[in-house]
Image: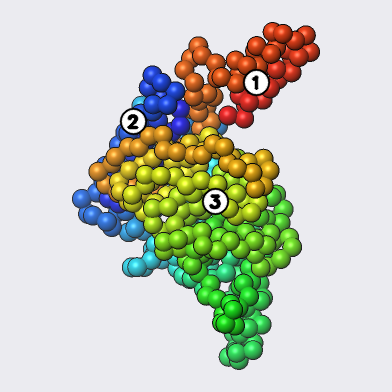
């Protein structure tokens, strides 16, 4: 069954699981409070969540709050929590926030909007917890770590998308005294990479009036992660509603720039889906859509969302969204058509929604594949197309039967 964790505006942490009732289309949600909300109000708002499945099939859950506090919890089989490690980001100032959080094995990475980057080693039986610090540019809106933790990327207000080598970013760098710079030298310096920086995007060309277009990256994610740090596919959403795709191997400017995607307040979040060529985009309003990465076209939009989407969490065949209307929704997903430009036959829809008393600010998938259902049909019944496969196999020779079985197995794995 799909299983997620959520955090809300008062600091509560919850476990949210979805399951089928009696029909293949009727879902129900079960919510368990792991950490109750704080009486101190929005100072404990959960700004980022991250989960990690250990090799022992237990779960670690990391959370960072608006007041700069952070904690990693171990979730036990009875849904009880124990604190693994707690700390506070002292460099976070009023009006600033956490823009990135990732939990990898025994290491936690956090980043704030003022560029305070921290790597925290969790306590082990033979070692004490420790932290490494680094500083990035200010006015950041989003920070993401790659799947292998070798690189990270960030962007923000007047901060172009930038790709960094993780280890080099935390290595000690002697301070460099900078002389007074002229305007021409400043422009040249803007093209120079910082120590640890692997690649930096370049602004799109001027508009039709020859005016510079402002840089304001509000959301970003990795696409098709590569083991080679300098060769990455990246996606960014901007405050003016554009979604831009970058290929660090070929250019600094976006290889695709799709305008008008975020219709209300610009793009709020972008998340890579589990289907090929699929990405989910939410604006600052209530629009949540699936896009085809081959041409930037919207393949379907989810209906019935009445509040601004605060967080999106893809999970294999499903996607969960949280919004300011106080609902956490389980949504179905379907990949783009096989050929570009073909009509989308199946469209994602809201399968189930769970009302919560406090606005959910973030939701994450637990990453546990074993909890996903392999089929949404009731036990003992076969999908209609598989029934036809069986009928064809009965009238064919053994070779045809083998092909039909192969098709069924392939479809089962794809779901």
The one nearer the camera, 105 or 114, is: 114
Which residue bears the numbered disc 2?
30
The one nearer the camera, 87 or 145, is: 145
Which residue bears the numbered disc 1?
408
Which residue bears the numbered disc 3?
298
**Mark closer to the chain start, 2 or 3:** 2
Q: Secondary structure at mark 3?
A: strand
Is residue 330 found left or right of 202 in the rendered image? Answer: left
State how far apart marks 1 and 3 are (Cα).
30 Å
Q: Is residue 410 visible?
A: yes
In contact (CB < 8 Å): disc 2 and disc 3: no
Q: Secondary structure at mark 2?
A: strand
State how far apart marks 1 and 2 are (Cα).
32 Å
**Measuring 47% from the left and 44% from the top, which residue is drawn there?**
313
Q: Residues within 10 Å of mark 1 (few under 14, many from 20)?
A: some
Q: Please state the horizontal and vertical placement of residue 330, each as a whole percent of the image.
A: 42, 37
**Mark closer to the chain start, 1 or 3:** 3
Is residue 160 found left or right of 122 in the rendered image? Answer: right
Model colouring:
rainbow
Is residue 52 found left or right of 249 in the rendered image? Answer: left
Q: Is residue 46 visible?
A: no
Image height of 343 relative to 70, above or below: above
**Measuring 41% from the left and 24% from the top, which residue is drawn there?**
20
Q: Secondary structure at mark 1?
A: helix
């Amino acid at each position: 069954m799909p299983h997620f964790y959520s955090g809300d505006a008062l600091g509560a942490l919850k476990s949210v699981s979805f399951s089928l009732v009696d029909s293949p289309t009727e879902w129900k949600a079960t919510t368990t409070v792991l950490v109750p909300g704080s009486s101190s109000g929005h100072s404990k708002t959960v700004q980022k969540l991250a989960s990690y499945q250990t090799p022992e099939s237990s779960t670690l859950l990391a959370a960072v709050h608006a007041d700069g506090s952070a904690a990693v919890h171990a979730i036990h089989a009875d849904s009880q929590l124990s604190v693994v490690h707690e700390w506070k980001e002292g460099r976070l100032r009023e009006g600033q926030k956490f823009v990135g959080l990732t939990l990898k094995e025994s290491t936690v990475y956090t980043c704030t909007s003022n560029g305070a980057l921290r790597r925290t080693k969790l306590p082990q039986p033979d070692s004490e917890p420790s932290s490494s610090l680094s500083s990035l540019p200010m006015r950041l809106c989003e920070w993401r770590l790659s799947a292998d933790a070798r690189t990270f990327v960030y962007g923000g207000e007047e901060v172009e998308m930038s790709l960094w080598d993780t280890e080099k970013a935390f290595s000690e760098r002697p301070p460099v005294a900078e002389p007074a710079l002229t305007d021409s030298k400043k422009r040249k310096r803007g093209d120079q990479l910082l120590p640890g920086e692997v690649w930096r995007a370049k602004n799109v060309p001027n508009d039709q009036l020859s005016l510079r277009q402002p840089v304001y990256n509000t959301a970003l994610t990795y696409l098709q992660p590569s083991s080679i740090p300098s060769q990455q596919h990246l996606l960014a959403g901007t405050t003016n509603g554009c979604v831009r795709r970058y290929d660090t191997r070929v250019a600094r400017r976006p290889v695709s720039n799709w305008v008008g995607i975020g219709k209300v307040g610009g793009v709020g979040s972008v998340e890579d889906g589990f289907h090929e060529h699929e990405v989910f985009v939410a604006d600052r309003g209530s629009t949540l859509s699936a896009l085809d990465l081959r041409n930037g076209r919207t393949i379907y939009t989810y209906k019935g969302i009445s509040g601004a989407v605060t967080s999106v969490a893809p999970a294999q065949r499903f996607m969960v969204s949280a919004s300011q209307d106080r609902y956490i929704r389980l949504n179905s997903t379907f990949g783009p058509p096989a050929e570009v430009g073909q009509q989308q036959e199946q469209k994602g829809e809201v399968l189930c929604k769970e009302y919560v008393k406090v606005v959910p600010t973030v939701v994450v998938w637990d990453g546990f594949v074993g909890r996903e259902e392999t089929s949404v049909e009731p036990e003992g019944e076969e999908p209609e197309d598989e029934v036809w496969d069986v009928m064809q196999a009965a009238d064919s020779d053994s070779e045809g039967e083998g092909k039909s079985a192969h098709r069924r197995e392939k479809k089962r794995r794809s779901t």
